[in-house]
Amino acid sequence: VPDRIREQSVLLNPTCVFPWCTRSARGCDSDHIQPYDAGGSTASDNIAPLCRSHHRLKTHGGWRYTRLDPGSFLWNSPHGYTYVRDATGTADVSRDRRPPPAHPPEPLAYGRP
Ligand SMILES: [Zn+2]
């Protein structure tokens, strides 16, 4: 990852962007959010700082994340939990998920009364 892109990533994200992690981005790896092997580009919108242990967890532990906005990330754990991580901290948004309805909604009635 070129120094310029790494520096942008560190300035935008002062710490590792894993949920609740507070390690300084200066000592972090530059992670390809969408893996390089899977076609992820080495560009500002696809690079974020992850500390070494969280980088390993993402690479080998089944965690996935996407960038929502500059400095804002949506994480999915291997156990189905979902977290939003941004400059204000980490929010567990897993509980916001609702089970699907038992029955699909009634179809709209078309035609003339
Ligand atoms: Zn970390």
Image (cartoon, rainbow, N blue to C red):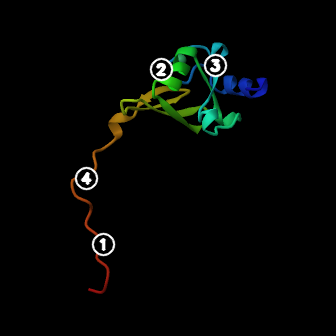
Relative vertical location of residue 54 with respect to residue 42 in this rendering, above or below: above
Element type at mark 3: strand
Is any part of residue 70 visible from this angle?
A: no
Q: Residue 101 got which mark?
A: 4
Q: Amino acid at mark 2?
A: Trp
Q: Tag 4: Cα neighbours inside 10 Å, few (<14), some, or many (≥20)?
A: few
Question: CB under 8 Å between callouts 3 and 4?
Answer: no
Q: Amino acid at mark 4?
A: Pro
Q: Residue 4 got which mark?
A: none
Element type at mark 2: loop
Q: Which residue is mark 1?
A: 108
What residue is rendered at 59% in x and 38% in y? 69
* Dot placed on the residue nearer the N-terminal end, 3 or 1: 3
The residue most toward the front is 37
The Cα–Cα distance between marks 2 and 1, rounded to whole angstroms, is 45 Å
The Cα–Cα distance between marks 1 and 4, rounded to whole angstroms, is 17 Å
* Dot placed on the residue nearer the N-terminal end, 2 or 1: 2
What residue is rendered at 65% in x and 12% in y? 27
What residue is rendered at 59% in x and 32% in y? 33
Label 4 C-beta lies within 8 Å of the nearest ligand 1 atom: no
Q: Tag 1: Cα neighbours inside 10 Å, few (<14), some, or many (≥20)?
A: few
* Dot placed on the residue nearer the N-terminal end, 3 or 4: 3
**Closer to the eye: label 3 or 4:** 3
Q: Residue 20 got which mark?
A: 2
Question: CB under 8 Å between callouts 2 and 4?
Answer: no
Location of residue 2 (image quadrant)? top right
The Cα–Cα distance between marks 3 and 4, rounded to whole angstroms, is 42 Å
Residue 72: give x, y in percent of width and height.
56, 33
Q: Which residue is mark 3?
A: 29
Viewer-closest of 49 and 58: 58
* Dot placed on the residue nearer the N-terminal end, 3 or 2: 2
The Cα–Cα distance between marks 2 and 4, rounded to whole angstroms, is 33 Å
